[in-house]
Amino acid sequence: MELKELKTKSEAELHRLLAESRDNLRDLRFKDASRQLKDVREIREVKKLIAQILTLLHLPKQSSDQ
């Protein structure tokens, strides 16, 4: 999912997507540890998605704090 798509989502949708992404990351890490994961790059992509979601969730808080 691209950053443009994430910006159009509501805060509730972002929280839901964040929870799903964290579950997905946990599953990928278990698969990697048991050598069942073929594409390890997928871990990097999910981590990047989580970081983008967290950034978007914290943006309004940063602007109101200043």
Image: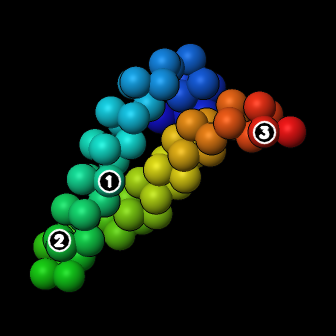
User: How far across and down, in percent of the image, does residue 25 sit?
Assistant: 30, 59
Give me the residue at 38% from left, 63% from top: 43
Which quadrant does the C terminus fall into?
top right
Give me the residue at 26% from left, 53% from top: 24
Vertical order, 55 against 11 (above or below): below
- Sequence-earlier tag: 2 or 3: 2
Residues under labels 1 and 3: Cα distance? 27 Å
Regarding residue 45, the answer to whether it shows in the image is: no
- 24 horizontally vs 14: left or right: left
- Sequence-earlier tag: 1 or 3: 1
Q: Which of marks 2 and 1 is in front?
A: 1
- 53 horizontally vs 40: left or right: right
Q: Which of marks 1 and 3 is in front?
A: 3
User: How far across and down, in percent of the image, does residue 9 sit?
Assistant: 50, 20
Residue at the spot of label 3: 65
Picture disc at residue 22: 1
User: How far across and down, in percent of the image, does residue 34 sit?
Assistant: 13, 81
- Circle 1 packing at 10 Å, graded few (<14), some (14-19), many (20+), is some
Picture disc at residue 31: 2
* Three-letter code, disc 3: Asp
* Three-letter code, disc 2: Lys
Residue projecting furthest to the right: 66
